[in-house]
Image: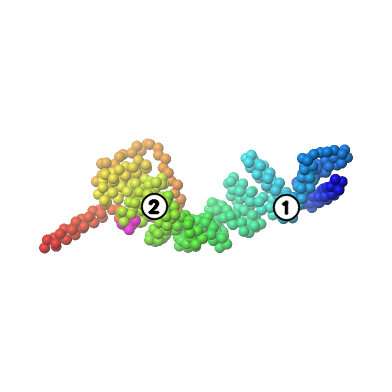
Amino acid sequence: MLIEKIIFNVLAFSLFILIFFRMIKKNDANYVVILFMQAFGIAINFVEIIFTLNIGTFMKFLIYLLAIIIPIIILYLEHKNINFSEIIYITATKIALLTKNTKKAKNFLITLVTKYPESYYGHKMLAEIYEKEGGMRKAIDEYVQVIDINKKDYNSYYKISYLLNDLNKKEEAAQMLETLLKKKPEMLEATELLGDIYCEQERYKEAANIYNEAIKYNPTSYELYYNMGMVYTLLNDFQNAKTCYEKAAAINTALYNGYYNLAQISLIYNDLEEAEKYFMQSVMSKDVEPKAYYNLAKIYMIKGDKENAIKFLNVAIDIDHSFYKKAEAEPIFIPIKSYINYPDMEEEQDIQNGLTKKEIKTQKHLEETMKLVGKLSYNNIKIKKEKKIDEKNRQDQREKE
């Protein structure tokens, strides 16, 4: 028993002195808390010795915990380059964030990074808070500190690129993303963002190249195939675009906007049956639903199915009243003009539009291509029908002869 007391006191005092000198060396008042806990544990032990008390198992465990176990854990963590004071500040920050006291959380982190400029977690958490508050430039500065400390924090590279893009610094964002993808080519978010920037700058071939490279690392990513399909569409390479959309749809059968693009390409190739099938699938998307119904109405007019043409045209107008004026100006609907329902223009409509800039640009390009190709021109269809009738008549005549 006496030997145990001697060992305890020698070890406890040694640890107390080590922690005290650690505090002096780092000039960090956070160690005072540990010193106070150690002193409290040592004091209880002295009381037990002086007054020959039997303090019980729980109190004995508490003495060892405060005077020996916790100090040893702290010294071990710091031996492993884990800063005890950093743990205190980060814990306090998380508690402040849980109570939604962002100002206090920032103060803890600013104190931490001022005292310990190499604090990776301090800079990173501060960057995330600034980002949420909309302080993009401050967030970028903190993320730069993060990657200076940890060169392999590729997520922070991406964050800087993302924020630069938001600040409309496209070239700087693109350069960072290009560097990032050389180091981590499988990073899907970086590929998608760089592809978006290239498309905004109309650098479609470069976008196609990075998507093709990313597919090697993410062969099951429908997003990559879908984005690649849009890029090929904008390059007028409709065959490759079709292949990419089909691969994307095979991976994600709910890719309704992709079905809409496939339908448009089918029309460009004058494949009405396939276009009808894809438009039917695309009506599940609120973003393209009225346009899909409107195009289905055109297809049914070409097929001579006026009943379905009227039905789908009125559905399109009911969803989006702006299609009424389009239908009025469209020659293909002249035979059913009297059956078009006039909408209540004063009725408020909640028109869904969750399309990205790239999706809008792609669909507009397909629609403009369709106008140039003219596959849905009623007059062209009429001429084709007349030619078919003439050919059939000539064939019948030849057979009779």
Q: Mark yes or no: residue 198 visible.
A: no
Q: Nearer the viewer, residue 380 or 153?
A: 153
Residue ID at (31%, 56%): 271
Disc number lying in front (2 or 1)? 1
For this view, does 312 lie left or right of residue 26?
left
Task: Tell me how many marks there are.
Answer: 2
| x, y percent for residue 100 | 62, 40
- Location of mark 2 (residue): 259
Residue ID at (88%, 40%): 50
> Spatial distance from mark 2 to mark 1, Cα to Cα?
56 Å
* Amino acid identity at mark 2: Tyr
Q: Is residue 170 above or below residue 330?
A: below
Q: In the image, is residue 130 part of the stretch drawn in magenta?
A: no
User: Of label 2 and label 1, which has the lower sequence position?
Assistant: 1
Q: Nearer the viewer, residue 15 or 139?
A: 15
Q: Is residue 279 above or below residue 52?
A: below
Q: Quadrant of the C terminus?
A: bottom left
Q: Which residues are magenta?
A: 266-270
For this view, does 349 lie left or right of residue 164?
left
| x, y percent for residue 51 | 87, 38
> Label 1: few (<14), some or many (≥20) within 10 Å?
few
Residue ID at (66%, 51%): 121
